[in-house]
Amino acid sequence: QVQLVESGGGLVLAGGSLRLSCAASGRTFGTMGWFRQAPGKEREFVAAIGGSILLADFVKGRFTISRDNAKNTVYLQMNSLKPEDTAVYYCAARYSYGNRQKINEYDYWGQGTQVTVSS
């Protein structure tokens, strides 16, 4: 059974940092990524890693994505957090390599972890 389990969310002051983790079990994936969904907004792409790295423009210079293939885990290091980064962050995985930004291009999803940035 394939599972993606996120951890690392929480409450942080603006300017602070958090590191999200997503552990995959059941199989390995070519590409893993992160999306987020703020209240009342659509889910949006944040970052993906599948051979290369793709970051959304609004996180460049602040967030980094990495993966540990031995642990089948992907990480999202979030620095210089802003209140507008407040959202539920979802881990996503797709079988093949190739970074994608569309929700329907990912095969599996985690349950999400809440990130709240207070000003």
Image (spheres, grey):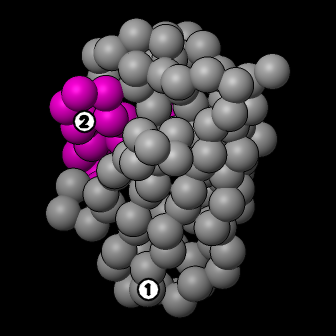
Would residue 42 appear left or right of 57 to someone viewing this image?
right
Q: Label 1 neighbourhood size at 10 Å, few (<14), some (14-19), many (20+)?
A: some
Which residue does the numbered mark 1 point to in the structure image?
16
**Magenta region, main secondary structure:** strand
Q: Label 2 neighbourhood size at 10 Å, few (<14), some (14-19), many (20+)?
A: many
Q: CA distance from mark 1 to mark 2?
A: 23 Å
Q: Amino acid at mark 2?
A: Leu
What x and y, as percent, mark residue 80? 34, 78
Residue at 67% x, 51% y: name it.
6
SS state under label 2: strand
Front residue of 104 and 86: 104
Q: Which residues are magenta?
A: 44-59
Residue at 33% x, 15% y: name it.
97
Q: Which mark is residue 54?
A: 2
On the rendered image, what quadrant is the N terminus found in?
A: top right
Mark 1 vs 2, N-terminal side: 1
Q: Which mark is residue 77?
A: none
Q: Quadrant of residue 37?
A: top right
What x and y, as percent, mark residue 9? 65, 67
